[in-house]
Amino acid sequence: SEEGRETAPHVTALYGLHEGVDPDAVRKALEGEGPITLALGRTSLFESKDDETPTDDVLYVQVESEDLKRINAKLAKLPHTNTHGSYKPHVTIAYLKKGAGEKYYNKPLPGI
């Protein structure tokens, strides 16, 4: 990512889906799901647990979505390894040096 910014914004539906899971199993698990509704909340921070950048602040936007929680529960029935604890949907904005994210903490996104 350029200057720490996330270049591929997304919301992860399930972390750690095992390699080799048949795409048809994913399609079947999500059968009947339509468009996803979500609400973007305030910004927040967490410390990166990535071995390559263990001291970074990760700036993200909180996401509220019953649709995403339901999809996560359906996908969680497939083989996966989740090392992140409970599901907390979010959009990563940037990876910042430790302490640099404080000025962005708990702010609404512009225009929301």
Image (cartoon, grey):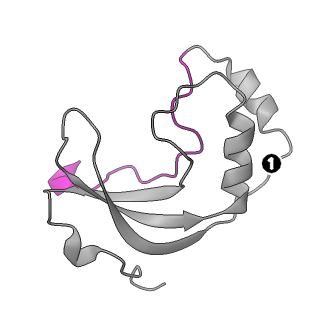
Is residue 111 rendered to the left or right of residue 4? right
Q: Which quarter of the picture shows residue 92?
A: bottom left
Number of numbered discs on residues: 1
Q: Is residue 2 above or below residue 64?
A: above
Q: Is residue 99 above or below residue 103?
A: above
Q: Position of residue 77 (x, y in %)?
A: 72, 29
What amino acid type should be assigned to the residue bearing mark 1? Glu
Residue 85 is a magenta residue: no
Residue, far right: 32
Tell me which residue sits at (72%, 57%) in the image: 67
* Frontmost residue, 7 versus 60: 60
| SS at badge 1 | loop
Q: Position of residue 100 (x, y in %)?
A: 14, 66
Tell me which residue sits at (54%, 64%) in the image: 63
* Frontmost residue, 49 versus 19: 49
Tell me which residue sits at (69%, 35%) in the image: 75
Q: Position of residue 47 (x, y in %)?
A: 27, 52
Q: Which quarter of the picture shows residue 52?
A: top left
According to the picture, the residue beneath numbered tag 1 turns out to be 33
Residue, far bottom: 111
Magenta: main secondary structure:
loop
Q: Which quarter of the picture shows residue 32?
A: top right
